[in-house]
Amino acid sequence: MKRARVAIVGATGYTGSELVRLLSEHPHAEIGAITSRSRAGEPFSAVHGAFRRLADQVLVQADALPSREIDLLFLALPHGTSMDFVAAQPTDGPPIIDLSGDFRLPDPAAYTEWYGAEHRAKDRLEEAVFGLPELFRDQVRDAKLVSNPGCYPTCAILALAPLLRRGLVRPSGIIVDAKSGVTGAGASVKASTHFPDVFGDFRAYKLVRHRHTPEIESALSRVAGTDVQVLFTPHLLPVDRGILATCYAEPTGEADTDSLRAAYREDYADEPFVRLVEEPPSIKQVRGSNYCDVQVTYDPRTRRVLALATIDNLVKGAAGQAIQNMNLLFGWPETTGLTQGPLTP
Amino acid sequence: MKRARVAIVGATGYTGSELVRLLSEHPHAEIGAITSRSRAGEPFSAVHGAFRRLADQVLVQADALPSREIDLLFLALPHGTSMDFVAAQPTDGPPIIDLSGDFRLPDPAAYTEWYGAEHRAKDRLEEAVFGLPELFRDQVRDAKLVSNPGCYPTCAILALAPLLRRGLVRPSGIIVDAKSGVTGAGASVKASTHFPDVFGDFRAYKLVRHRHTPEIESALSRVAGTDVQVLFTPHLLPVDRGILATCYAEPTGEADTDSLRAAYREDYADEPFVRLVEEPPSIKQVRGSNYCDVQVTYDPRTRRVLALATIDNLVKGAAGQAIQNMNLLFGWPETTGLTQGPLTP
Amino acid sequence: MKRARVAIVGATGYTGSELVRLLSEHPHAEIGAITSRSRAGEPFSAVHGAFRRLADQVLVQADALPSREIDLLFLALPHGTSMDFVAAQPTDGPPIIDLSGDFRLPDPAAYTEWYGAEHRAKDRLEEAVFGLPELFRDQVRDAKLVSNPGCYPTCAILALAPLLRRGLVRPSGIIVDAKSGVTGAGASVKASTHFPDVFGDFRAYKLVRHRHTPEIESALSRVAGTDVQVLFTPHLLPVDRGILATCYAEPTGEADTDSLRAAYREDYADEPFVRLVEEPPSIKQVRGSNYCDVQVTYDPRTRRVLALATIDNLVKGAAGQAIQNMNLLFGWPETTGLTQGPLTP
Amino acid sequence: MKRARVAIVGATGYTGSELVRLLSEHPHAEIGAITSRSRAGEPFSAVHGAFRRLADQVLVQADALPSREIDLLFLALPHGTSMDFVAAQPTDGPPIIDLSGDFRLPDPAAYTEWYGAEHRAKDRLEEAVFGLPELFRDQVRDAKLVSNPGCYPTCAILALAPLLRRGLVRPSGIIVDAKSGVTGAGASVKASTHFPDVFGDFRAYKLVRHRHTPEIESALSRVAGTDVQVLFTPHLLPVDRGILATCYAEPTGEADTDSLRAAYREDYADEPFVRLVEEPPSIKQVRGSNYCDVQVTYDPRTRRVLALATIDNLVKGAAGQAIQNMNLLFGWPETTGLTQGPLTP
């Protein structure tokens, strides 16, 4: 089989380096180019030292991309930059998988509200497909522009979707108390990620106003067929990778743990990357892998459903899911290149 | 002033060593004896190496306690063992501050339900005072038996009390999503605290059945004057010390952040150890100190109140609070010996 | 190509689970059986939860191994147990790669001295090959019994070998100051690996008497053609994986950094898993991979050579190297199944 | 007793905040002023949130210091800035304890060589006393300008001084392999202290050229009465606080562990902050305290002496030692305000 040539646009962040890590093992894809505005001319491994010998190719400017020879573009750019890049692409160009937040909210007004800026690629936004394969697999197959979900949303949506699809819980009053490792904050150096302050610490941040809120609500609303509202609270875990979402919802009728688990088993029976677990899921048991571990349980005392899920934010929450989407786009088996087990302990 | 002589019963755990750390700096108390069943005859510092030179006194068997010369007993014993020890004490003995869970639930039936054993000191249970000074200060002053609150309950109750006291939130449907450092699991070696498995990991545990649930409910019910029900979810944080409780409740009427904060300021105005903060509280900013940092905020979008609090589980959540209770019992200023600032970074 | 069927003897430790992780990705090998004395009858993933779905096969007792159908045995057993297992195998059985320390010291008297027990498989010891491919590749190809090197020795020997092979440093007075993540202490729960004590801590252990000392000396002596003596000091790093060895040696003649680096480049030119670096190597840049990063430098002021190396103790220091040895034994390209990049950050 | 009023010049770093933490507990000193160039006008606790309520005083510009009313100045300024500040002070001003590196090397030429700049306060340099009380206590008592030692030097010098004072080891060929928590790199945000990169990592840095090298040599040379040369290798430990120095030296004559320990006991018999230990010292067992734990041992096999020491780099390695020096200057008992035990676990 001729290998597909893919380009990674934006190389200095963690989603960029994680794409390189995973694509290096992919049997049908090869990296045709990696771009960087600030580090063009240097080898990729000069930016990410761990990749010495594995990925020494020289970074190029985005405008020097050999577009004719590229079969797919992964955009690992900051919010804002990404939509401008997309807007500048020819419509008959190769398909795009965008890992930024720019195309995740179908409604441009929501973008303005939560991102604080006008959307600058509204026509492309209309055709963008939300790339969560477990929910929207069929649409991804035919997409020209896949918007790769955020890390928190991937975790929270997979935890809650079966409940909302079946109307088992009320669509409001849902709590998503989520905790993420620090790579979720990106590779840029900032005060909030200074090691001596984060080590041994734990705290919430961006209470009631994190941008992943409308993304979770938008996807779950489509699943539920009605407006879903969640209160989403992110916390910064003093680890590098991993997200745990602990979700609470109120059942609409009678409930018990066994029937909830049966519903999840039915919904996720054929999902290669969702593992249903009966003990609280652990972020380390998915580290480095594309798995999402999910547990659901019921508390008859307080009449609440608990749904917990864990992912590696850089894999199922970013680069791994992007490759899963690429596999769908190219018609390859969905697990291709994503079979690496968790790195644990 | 003649110094009070106190005894610490049970030396091998972390509450024992933390009591020694804090009492070493207390101007009015001195450690008369420290007991240990398994390590009697050895210096305290042979068990806790960090205390070399600071606390080299020899551990004695509990039955060798010089009771006549002891003015107060701190019990740092496991659940179950503690109530047997209390039952065996003469009623005219020195006051007792018990750090176990044995005397925290006023109703012995609740003890049986959550601890899985019959309570064996019911008469002493009746007189036990729940030693959370911010709520029950006056009763502590006259107590013969103070039951020192659990770590999670201290944090959750201080986060939620102003809301429930004033009827600002509904007494059911409350979520306490709490995260604790590993010292909360004790000094005994166990599989769940093996370093390679906990490092880089994060997970919930004991869903819907943790023993601190009825303790939180019992104290908040007294505050509210009505039955309060909480869904409490503990998580294991990969750090040594610190608890963050993220609490969610539904307002009974109109609400906004400003008026909620005003209520908290009023309730906690004179509390030396409660600090109201306007950014999400951090566990490291209370590390090693007796502070409890509390933030309350309102989400008008989802109509939910968020109350967050952090403590050091071994200080305000155990040994520090025990000393605060001792200060009350002896009529000393409540902050005596507890003025050490947080160790941060 | 028909896949080779391998068996893993001993499943509960970290070398066992790491072998499963890596073999799952190997194109030419499949796991025919995994044994466990204590957990036989349970699925592998019941012991190592992260491997749910990836490795759910049922563990068997070692004496139930289908030996006829097994092409190679990996022994992931404790010291002592391993030599008894080997002694009980038929001499015409499948080749064995032993990951314990039992066959690493050619001289049985050294075994007695450092392991405190008589060697119980001396005839097999004679034929055992020290499986460090970078030094003894040719012998491994024809071996019946490969003794997989220890984690510290792998790191220290690869750091120092070029210096000793060429007589560039004196064979005595060599210091190996090494630091290892806690997985090096194994999966068994013990006081020294209790999370609250190790978190935020760092200390040396087993000063001047660690069993890896004679293993380092033995291999380097063969390389040097003369007796080499090292002072080896292990330290416990509060991380899960990774070893850094910082080595000091006295040059025999004139020295400078450039010529030292040239020597290393020459020796390691064709080594797929040794990466020469010019900045101090990092354990995270090899995490999860089979790489060994090596730096050499010279201090003209004090006239000392510094050689630093990092590995992942569970990969190049254990399971990865074992698979590298399997590849040699079966005549496959040495990197087969070992091309996964480092998991970083 | 009238309290001494001290000023802290430079408030945004960790040595500044640690001085505040410790001085808050000092019975004879009070903080008269804290300065900051960049944050003047804000409360100290706005910079260091953990100090809310403990230290809310407003920061002032250094030129607004009420010098008449200040009895002592602690300088917590960067290298270079500090000597300019000292040069500008009147010679009859209050005594100064400088925590920067500017006055640690008696020879201005050494300053130029290792700091890459001309010394700009040479006359004050001449009178500066190296404030390591265990070695130079008598000179500190009468000093006008105390140069507080660096963190690594404090640890290494205390580990090695008894050996060199008595001529027990050769003054060259000494190795100091040291490991420090990340607070040693300061409070300023930089790429090398980005949490995701440091977490789970470990590496050496500044091989053979760290500025603490001449500081260690200078102090040990004075102790030895001859030129001492050390090869110093710093490593970055993924923890917040703590230094372990593992030192290697060659004995000049016969040696054994018992007699070495006897020498250390003799030298450190009356030292309140040096604890001799017989097991490898632990950084967590000194965390937050002014202790330095020291172990010496001998390896008869390789004929080398090992001396290991641990400190908290921000306490005995910075602020605690500065207060110890203040106590000496003012004639107070040396342990005043420094009796807090280690925070452990």
Image (cartoon, coloured by chain):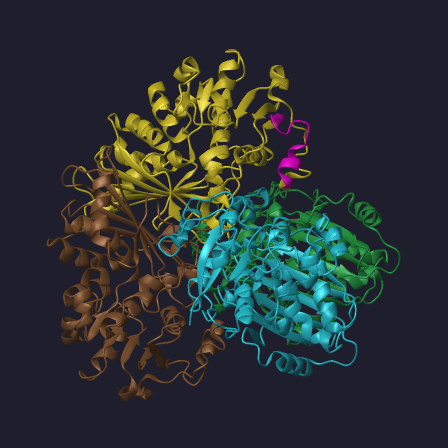
Chain colours: A yellow, B brown, C green, D cyan
Q: Judge from the rendering whether residue B104 lies leftward or rightward of residue A291; answer left or right.
A: left
Residue A45 falls within the magenta-colored stretch = yes
* Residue D10 seen in this snapshot: yes
In which quadrant of the rendered view does residue B300 lie? top left
Q: Which residues are drawn in magenta? A: A31-49
* Residue A199 seen in this snapshot: no
View extreme (left): residue: B225
Residue C132, x across and y down, in percent = 72, 55
View extreme (right): residue: C253
> A56 or B135, which is in the foreground?
B135
> A18 or B291, which is in the foreground?
B291
Q: Judge from the rendering whether residue C185 lies leftward or rightward of residue C271; answer left or right.
A: left
Give me the residue at 40% from left, 68% from top.
B188
> A139 or A222, which is in the foreground?
A222
Residue D56, x across and y down, in percent = 38, 52
Which of the image's four quarters has the N terminus of chain A? top right
